[in-house]
Image (cartoon, rainbow, N blue to C red):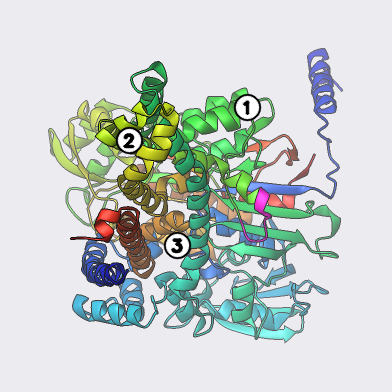
C-alpha cells in the first residue's frame, strides 16, 4: 500500500466523480440503443465480397459487423478466437489444427462448420483470383476436414504467425455452397445481420438474437453506417449530433471538436507509416553509405509536427510499429544530424550528391510537402534533393516500384513476418526497396528462421535484430507513423483500450462500443 | 397548330443529332482520362498481370472505335452497359448478379429529380416574384438590396453557400439537418426536411439569374406605348406589370427558367457531395474517381439529354407564349 499517495487517491476520487457525473459506467456495458457512424472510404462499387475490401467503410461493415473471421486481434493486440475456438501447431509450425466453435449459425440459419472454412478460403486462390489475400491462402499446401468442427492446414513452410493471418479482413467466412448468394445479400455469422445496404451510401444492421458471442459483445440493437467521404461534411455531421462517431478527423478543425464538451477524440498510434523507399539495386542507392547519409538528413520530428500536425510518432526506418508484438521500442532513435550525413557521403567518396525524389499526394496526404521539408533539411548535409512532383493518377503503377526514390505509405500488418514477407523479403512483388540478400544476407536468413520459430523470446531477439539492420542499412526511410484519429460523441461508451491495427477500434466499434 | 408540331419534330431531330455528337465527345473525353479502372481499383496492388487480367475481362484492350460502336449500339437498344465495378465482381463470382448501369442510375436520378423539383418549387416563384417587385420598385432600396443579395449569392461558389447555410441553420441554430442522406422508405415529410438545406443552397445559386431576367424583361416593356396607354387609363402599377407587361415578357423568362432547371439536374454535383445527398452527382463523382467508364458515360449522356430536352421545352413554350411566333407571316 506504499504507493497509495494522497494525490493518487484524490485523482481516482475525482475521476470516479467525473465518470459518475457524465453517467459513463465504469465497466458494465449494457445492451440497447443505436450506433450511427459517419465513415469515409466508401464507394459505389462496394459489395459484400471481402476479397475486394480495402477501405474502412467495408472493413467495418463486413468483418467488424456482418461477417466473422477465424481469429480476431483484440484491442490490446493479442490474438483471440472468433469462429475458431482454439488452434495448435506442430513443432515445425507447418501443420495447424483449428477447432471451430460449435453451435454457430449463419444469418440464414445454416450451421457453420469445416466445409465453410475450406470453401471460404478457396475463394482466394485460382488463376483468376484478384484477392488481396491470395498470397496468404496460397501458402497453405493442403486443407483437410478432420471433423464437422475441425480443420487441418498444412503449410508449404512453417509459419508461427499463421493464426494471425487468419484474422485478415479479406478472409471472412461465407456459407459453403451459397457464397454467391451470401455476397449478394451479406449473409455471415457476425453480430449484426443486414437490414439494408446501399453501396456507397448506407448500411444498416440489426443485432442477431442469440449470437454466439453472447452478452459480452455487440451491445447495440441497431447500427447504421453512413458513407460521408467529404471531410467537412463528416465533421459537420458529428458536430450537429447527426452521427455518433466519425473516422479520420480533419486536423485543421480539430480544435472545434475539442471545444465541444459532448465529443471526445480517440487517438492511437498503430502500424500505419509513411515511407520513402529507395531501390537498393540502382545507383546511388546501392551504396549503403549514401543510404545512411539520407537517413541522417531527415528531420523526423519536423515531419511529424508539420505534416501530421503532431498526430503521429517518429519512425526509425523500420515498418514495425507500436501495434506489433515484437516492436523494438527502446532501439536507439535515428536523429537529424547533417554532420553525419556529410561523414557518410565522404565514406561513399562524395562531397555532395544530387538526387531526385518522386512524390505525389496519392502516396499520402502531404507527401509533396514532406518531400520539400526533406529537401531543406538534407541540403545542410550536402544532399541536393530535387523534388519531382508526379501526377496522382497512375502513381502506384508508374512511379512506385519504378522510380529509384519515391514516396509511399503502408497501413502496416498485424505481425512482423506478414509485413516483412509483403515488402522486405527477397523477390516478393511489393519489395519496394529491392531489399535482398545482396543487401543483407543476415536479414533474409533471420526472416526465414523467425517465421518458423514458436519460442516467443527467440523471436523477439530475431525481430529486434532485423529492425536494427533495417534502421542502420535498410533501403526505406520510414520517418513517421501516422496515428488513427477518430471522434466519438459521449452518448457512446467505448472501452479504455482502443485497437490500433485499423481505424475505429480495429473497425469493430459495432462489437465493442455501447450506448451510454 | 400544324406549324408548331412540325417545329417540335424538327427540334427533336436536331436534338438527336446534338446528342450523337455529344456522345462522341463524351466517349473520347472520358477515354482520354489518365489512369484506368484496373489501376485504380487495384491501387497499390496494381501488378502488370493483375491489371491486364482486369483489362481483358472488361474489354478495355479493344480499340477505341470498336468500344464506341458497341456502346452506341447498346444505347440504341436501351442498354447502357454494366458498370466495371459490377463486371469485376461478376468475374470474381463466375456469373450471377447482373446489375446494369441503368439500375444503378435510376434510383439516384430520381433522388436528384426530387431535389431539383423541391428547389424549383421554391426558387421559381421566389425569383419571379422578386423580379416583378424589383421592376415595380426599380431603383429603390428594395431593388438594390434584392439585386445585391442575389448577385452575391450567385457569385460565391456553391460549396461556400452550402457551408454558410450549414453554419447558420444546422450548427448555430440546429433547425435543419446538415446530412441529407435520404433513403428508400422514408416518409415524404422526412425526405423534404432532409433535402431542405441542399434545396435552399441551390435556390440561392439559381435565383439571381431568373430574377434579373424577369426584372430586365419587364422594365424593357415598360417603355412601350401600350404600357403607357394602360397607365393613362389609371391602372395601378402592380396591375400594369402583372396583367400587361408580364405576359409579353414570358418568353425570355421561360428560357432562363428552363436553363436553370437543366442546371439543377446537371450542376448539383458539388452540393450533393457536401450534403451527402445520394443523387446522381455523387454517383458521378464516385465513378470518375475509379474510372468506371460506363457509369460516367451514362451520367454524361443523361446530363446532355436533360439540357437538350429542357432547352427544347423552353423553345416550344416561348413559341406558344408568343402569338407572333405562332403565326409567322
Q: Which residue is mark 3?
A: A421
> Which residues are drawn in magenta?
B183-189
Q: Is residue A270 above or below residue B64?
A: above
Q: Is residue A279 above or below residue A516?
A: below
Residue at (34, 58) in percent of width and height? B320
Q: Which residue is mark 1?
A: B173
Mark 3 burial class by Cα count in 10 Å: few <14, some 14-19, many 20+: many
Can you give x and y, in whole percent of width and height, for residue B292 in the image?
A: 37, 66
Mark 2 burial class by Cα count in 10 Å: few <14, some 14-19, many 20+: many
Find the residue positioned furthest to the top.
A6
Q: For the C terminus of chain A, which image quadrant? A: top right
Does residue B89 appear in this view?
yes
Quadrant in the rendering for residue A155: bottom right
Q: Element under label 2? A: helix
Between disc 1 and disc 3, the foreground one is 1
**Mark 1 or mark 2, which has the lower sequence index?**
1
Q: Please state if A116 lies on the left or on the right of A391 as rendered.
A: right
- In reply to whether residue A97 is colored magenta, the answer given is no
Q: Of the numbered discs in the image, which one, if any, rests on residue B218?
A: 2
Q: Please state if A223 lies on the left or on the right of A215 as rendered.
A: left
Q: CA distance from mark 1 to mark 3?
A: 54 Å
Residue at (61, 48) in percent of width and height? B192
Between disc 3 and disc 2, the foreground one is 2
Q: Element under label 3? A: helix
Quadrant in the rendering for residue A472: top left
Q: Predominant secondary structure in magenta?
A: loop
Does residue A308 appear in this view?
no
Amino acid at each position: 500500500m506504499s504507493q497509495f499517495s494522497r494525490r493518487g487517491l484524490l485523482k481516482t476520487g475525482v475521476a470516479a466523480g467525473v465518470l459518475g457525473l457524465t453517467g459513463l459506467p465504469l465497466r458494465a456495458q449494457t445492451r440497447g440503443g443505436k450506433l450511427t457512424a459517419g465513415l469515409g472510404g466508401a464507394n459505389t462499387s462496394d459489395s459484400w465480397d471481402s476479397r475486394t475490401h480495402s477501405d474502412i467503410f467495408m472493413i467495418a461493415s463486413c468483418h467488424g459487423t456482418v461477417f466473422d473471421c477465424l481469429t480476431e486481434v483484440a484491442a490490446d493486440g493479442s490474438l483471440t478466437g472468433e469462429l475458431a475456438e482454439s488452434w495448435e501447431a506442430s513443432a515445425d509450425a507447418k501443420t495447424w489444427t483449428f477447432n471451430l466453435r460449435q453451435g454457430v449459425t449463419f444469418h440464414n440459419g445454416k450451421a457453420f462448420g469445416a466445409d465453410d472454412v475450406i470453401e471460404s478460403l478457396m475463394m482466394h486462390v485460382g488463376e483468376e483470383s484478384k484477392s488481396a489475400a491470395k498470397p496468404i491462402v496460397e501458402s497453405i499446401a493442403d486443407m483437410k476436414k478432420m471433423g464437422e468442427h475441425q480443420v487441418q492446414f498444412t503449410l508449404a513452410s512453417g509459419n508461427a504467425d499463421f493464426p494471425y493471418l487468419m484474422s485478415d479482413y479479406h478472409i471472412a467466412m461465407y456459407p459453403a455452397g451459397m457464397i454467391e448468394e451470401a455476397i449478394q445479400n451479406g449473409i455471415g455469422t457476425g453480430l449484426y445481420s443486414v437490414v439494408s445496404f446501399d453501396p456507397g451510401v448506407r448500411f444498416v444492421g440489426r443485432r442477431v438474437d442469440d449470437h454466439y458471442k453472447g452478452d459480452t459483445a455487440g451491445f447495440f440493437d441497431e447500427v447504421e453506417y453512413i458513407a460521408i467521404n467529404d471531410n467537412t461534411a463528416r465533421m459537420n455531421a458529428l458536430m450537429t449530433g447527426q452521427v455518433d462517431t466519425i473516422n479520420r478527423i480533419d486536423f485543421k478543425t480539430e480544435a472545434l471538436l475539442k471545444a465541444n464538451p459532448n465529443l471526445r477524440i480517440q487517438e492511437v498510434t498503430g502500424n500505419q507509416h509513411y515511407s520513402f523507399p529507395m531501390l537498393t539495386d540502382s545507383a546511388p542507392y546501392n551504396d549503403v553509405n549514401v543510404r545512411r547519409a539520407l537517413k541522417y538528413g531527415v528531420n523526423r520530428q519536423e515531419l511529424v509536427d508539420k505534416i501530421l500536425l503532431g498526430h503521429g510518432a517518429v519512425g526509425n526506418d523500420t515498418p514495425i510499429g507500436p501495434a506489433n508484438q515484437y516492436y523494438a521500442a527502446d532501439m536507439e532513435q535515428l536523429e537529424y544530424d547533417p554532420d553525419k550525413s556529410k561523414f557518410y557521403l565522404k565514406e561513399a567518396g562524395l562531397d555532395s550528391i544530387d538526387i531526385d525524389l518522386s512524390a505525389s499526394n496519392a502516396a499520402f496526404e502531404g507527401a509533396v510537402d514532406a518531400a520539400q521539408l526533406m529537401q531543406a533539411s538534407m541540403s545542410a548535409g550536402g544532399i541536393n534533393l530535387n523534388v519531382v512532383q508526379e501526377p496522382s493518377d497512375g502513381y502506384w503503377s508508374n512511379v512506385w516500384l519504378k522510380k529509384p526514390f519515391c514516396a509511399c505509405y503502408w497501413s502496416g500488418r498485424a505481425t512482423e513476418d506478414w509485413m516483412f514477407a509483403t515488402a522486405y523479403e527477397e523477390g516478393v512483388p511489393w519489395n519496394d526497396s529491392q531489399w535482398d540478400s545482396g543487401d543483407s544476407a543476415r536479414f533474409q536468413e533471420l526472416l526465414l528462421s523467425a517465421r518458423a520459430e514458436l519460442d516467443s523470446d527467440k523471436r523477439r531477439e530475431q525481430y529486434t535484430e532485423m529492425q536494427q539492420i533495417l534502421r542502420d542499412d535498410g533501403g526505406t526511410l520510414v520517418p513517421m507513423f501516422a496515428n488513427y484519429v477518430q471522434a466519438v460523441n459521449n452518448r457512446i461508451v467505448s472501452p479504455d483500450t482502443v485497437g490500433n491495427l485499423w481505424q475505429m477500434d480495429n473497425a469493430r466499434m459495432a462489437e465493442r462500443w455501447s450506448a451510454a | 397548330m400544324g406549324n408548331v408540331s412540325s417545329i417540335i419534330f424538327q427540334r427533336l431531330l436536331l436534338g438527336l443529332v446534338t446528342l450523337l455528337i455529344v456522345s462522341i465527345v463524351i466517349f473520347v473525353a472520358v477515354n482520354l482520362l489518365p489512369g484506368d479502372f484496373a489501376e485504380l481499383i487495384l491501387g497499390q496492388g496494381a501488378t502488370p498481370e493483375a491489371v491486364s487480367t482486369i483489362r481483358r475481362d472488361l474489354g478495355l484492350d479493344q480499340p477505341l472505335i470498336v468500344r464506341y460502336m458497341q456502346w452506341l449500339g447498346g444505347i440504341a437498344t436501351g442498354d447502357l452497359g454494366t458498370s466495371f465495378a459490377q463486371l469485376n465482381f461478376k468475374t470474381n463470382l463466375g456469373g450471377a448478379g447482373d446489375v446494369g448501369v441503368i439500375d444503378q442510375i435510376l434510383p439516384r436520378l430520381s433522388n436528384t429529380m426530387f431535389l431539383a423539383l423541391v428547389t424549383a418549387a421554391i426558387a421559381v416563384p421566389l425569383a419571379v416574384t422578386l423580379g416583378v417587385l424589383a421592376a415595380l420598385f426599380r431603383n429603390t432600396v428594395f431593388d438594390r438590396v434584392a439585386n445585391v443579395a442575389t448577385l452575391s449569392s450567385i457569385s460565391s461558389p456553391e460549396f461556400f453557400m452550402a457551408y454558410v447555410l450549414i453554419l447558420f441553420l444546422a450548427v448555430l441554430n440546429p433547425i435543419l439537418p446538415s446530412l441529407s442522406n435520404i433513403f428508400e422508405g422514408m416518409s415524404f415529410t422526412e425526405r423534404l426536411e432532409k433535402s431542405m438545406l441542399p434545396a435552399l443552397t441551390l435556390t440561392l445559386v439559381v435565383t439571381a439569374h431568373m430574377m434579373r431576367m424577369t426584372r430586365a424583361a419587364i422594365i424593357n416593356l415598360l417603355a412601350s406605348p401600350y404600357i403607357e396607354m394602360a397607365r393613362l387609363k389609371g391602372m395601378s402599377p402592380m396591375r400594369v406589370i402583372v396583367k400587361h407587361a408580364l405576359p409579353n415578357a414570358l418568353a425570355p423568362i421561360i428560357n432562363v427558367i428552363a436553363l436553370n432547371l437543366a442546371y439543377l439536374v446537371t450542376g448539383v454535383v458539388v452540393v450533393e457531395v457536401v450534403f451527402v445527398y445520394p443523387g446522381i452527382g455523387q454517383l458521378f463523382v464516385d465513378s470518375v474517381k475509379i474510372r468506371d467508364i460506363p457509369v460516367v458515360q451514362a451520367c454524361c449522356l443523361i446530363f446532355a439529354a436533360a439540357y437538350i430536352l429542357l432547352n427544347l421545352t423552353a423553345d416550344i413554350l416561348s413559341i406558344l407564349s408568343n402569338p407572333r411566333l405562332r403565326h409567322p407571316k
